[in-house]
Each structure stands twice: as C-alpha cells, then as structure tokens.
Image (cartoon, rainbow, N blue to C red):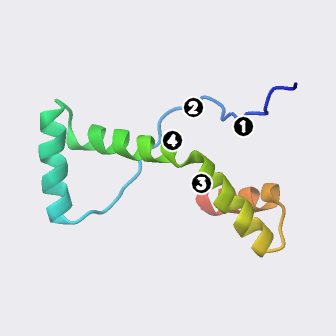
Amino acid sequence: MSKPQIETMPLEENVRLNITISRYNLQRLKYWAAISGKTPSAYASQIISARLEVNFDLINQQLEDLAQSQGMTLADLKELLDKQDSK
C-alpha cells in the first residue's frame, strides 16, 4: 500500500495578521490569555492555529468544492487565491 501524499508548506517566518474583534471578545480573550499565562496576541494565535488544524480536512473539501463550482482545477484555484493574498 502506498503512503498518502501530504501537502507540505516550506518553512518560513511567521506572518503578522491584523484582525478586528469586538470589545466584548477582546475582554474575554484577555481573561483567557491571562489564565494561561500568555499575552492576548499569543493566545489568539494559538486559538487560530488550533482551529485551522482541526478543520484541515473540511477546508480542503471546501476548496475542492469551490474549484469544481467555478470550473477550475484545485491547483488553479489555489494559485488564484495566493495571488489575491499577495496584493
């Protein structure tokens, strides 16, 4: 039996992301981060990373569905999205 192909990303430096959340959620984030001994930014980063990891298969399926609905290959859709990200 062959091993499944795993898509890997090249190692790179972290990227800064500016987000906006409500004051209510920021206050809760501050509390949660303090309980964990982290800054709100560091904790938010961990939360986002964990949610992406948990939803990896769903994200891939949604990408495939979107590509198919647009009459594109998955590779073409990813290339398009990557170009939009670099603007």
Percent position of residue 10, x then y? 66, 31
* Callout 2 touching callout 3 (CB < 8 Å): no
Residue at numbered disc 1: 7
Q: Amino acid at mark 3?
A: Leu
Amino acid type at circle 1 is Glu
- Which sits earlier in the primary sequence, circle 1 or circle 2? 1
Say which element carries label 1. loop
Of the 4 image quadrants, the one containing the C terminus is: bottom right
Q: Measure the C-alpha gap from mark 1 to mark 2.
A: 15 Å
Identify the residue under disc 4. 53
Q: Horizontally, is 58 left or right of 2 in the view?
A: left
Mark seen at residue 12: 2
- Identify which residue is drawn at 73% across, 60% down: 64
The residue positioned 73% from the left and 33% from the top of the image is 6
The amino acid type found where label 4 is placed reads Glu
Gap between marks 4 and 1 measured at Cα: 13 Å
Whether the residues at callouts 2 and 4 have beta carbons within 8 Å, the answer is no
Which of pointers 4 and 3 lies earlier in the amino acid sequence? 4
Residue under label 3: 58
Q: Mark 1 or mark 2, which is nearer to you? A: 1
Counting from the top left corner in percent of width and height, residue 34 is at 13, 37
Label 3 element class: helix
Relative to 37, say whether 45 is above or below: below
